[in-house]
Image (tube, rainbow, N blue to C red):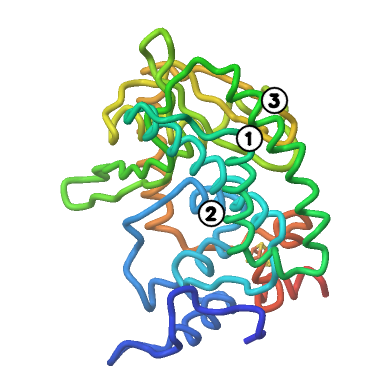
Amino acid sequence: MTDVLAIADGNGAAPAGRPHPQEMAEHVAAGGSPFDYVEPPDWFSFSSLDTFERCPRQYALRYLCRLQAEQPRPAADFGSAAHAAFETFTRRRREGLARNEEPPDRADLERFFEAAWAGSPLAAEPDAESWRARAVPMLDRFWEAESADRSQTVGEELRFRLRLELDPKSRVVVGGFIDRIDRLPSGGVELIDYKTGGAWDPVDVESSLQLSIYALGCRDALELGRPERVTLNFVEHGMRYSAERSNGALDNVRDGLAMRAREIRGSDFMPTPGPRACGWCDFAAICSAREREVA
Ligand code: SF4
């Protein structure tokens, strides 16, 4: 197996009496079923569902074989550092307000980013400084928006676990982390997801499954009620796009999630190769379907 891949949680050792995880990955990459080795999954996330939509074999390699790429991911690392800075900023402000302390200021925001940056793999990359320079206008825009905002943050990085019953014997969980939930002046809540990189078309915000899953998690798992609005905050552009999700729409999403979970649990993980899916796939070097397409 190529050396840019690793077993995500593994030390390389196979549990007693069970096949080696690398053997399973090679079996799946060659077209075998992961269920020859593991039980059907009982945990899903937006990312895992999205991966299955893109290519079922890619899903099986990533989420059932637990393979992950080891090559640098500068855009993701930059996003992680930005998320960490924003999370620390709003948490310190929220906790400080409860103690009648001064909220963090622009310099503090910069410090929070620097702390996150120092622990990021991106800081050691050759083009680290160009990424770091990119953070300055982003922090400025975030600070300006926060200075003008009258909402109160309810929480950051809120973990939810949405339990779904597929049939009387099968239950699964759809889980995730919501970047931020604010209490609006109206009394309702706003669910916010930060995005670094390019801004989306507003139409895609309306139809975003990720936001729908998070809104469902807010309503049915965190029990904070249906969000009054769901928002993508494109932090590098200072742009926010908001949309609504009705209770009926969320009920439909819940049914749709159960349907997708059933589909995955019964899947044969047939690959769906294509230039777009394979072009960004971490497993192209080991996947037999990709090799056939290239040939
Ligand atoms: S290389 Fe293509 S066909 Fe193979 S797992 Fe990746 S996306 Fe699917």
Q: Which label sits on residue 52?
A: 2
Instruction: Kindly give the residue lying farthest to the left in the view shown.
Output: 168
Q: Which label sits on residue 169?
A: none
Foreground residue among 114 and 34? 114
Lower position in the chain sequence, tag 3 or tag 1? 1
Mark 3 vs mark 2: give the one in front: 3
Amino acid type at image mark 1: Arg
Residue labelled 2 has its Cβ within 8 Å of some atom of ligand 1: no
Q: Secondary structure at mark 1?
A: helix
* CA gap, disc 3 and disc 1: 19 Å
Amino acid type at image mark 3: Met
Instruction: Kindly give the residue lying farthest to the front in the view shown.
Output: 101
Answer above or below: position of 126 versus 176: below
Mark 1 vs mark 2: give the one in front: 1
Q: Is residue 189 left or right of residue 232?
A: left
For label 1, the residue is: 106
Q: Is residue 17 left or right of residue 36?
A: left
Lower position in the chain sequence, tag 1 or tag 2? 2
Answer above or below: position of 16 versus 223: below
**Quadrant housing the C terminus:** bottom right
Can residue 255 be seen here? The reply is no
Contact (Cβ within 8 Å) of mark 3 with mark 2? no
For label 3, the residue is: 239
Residue labelled 3 has its Cβ within 8 Å of some atom of ligand 1: no
Foreground residue among 144 and 45? 144
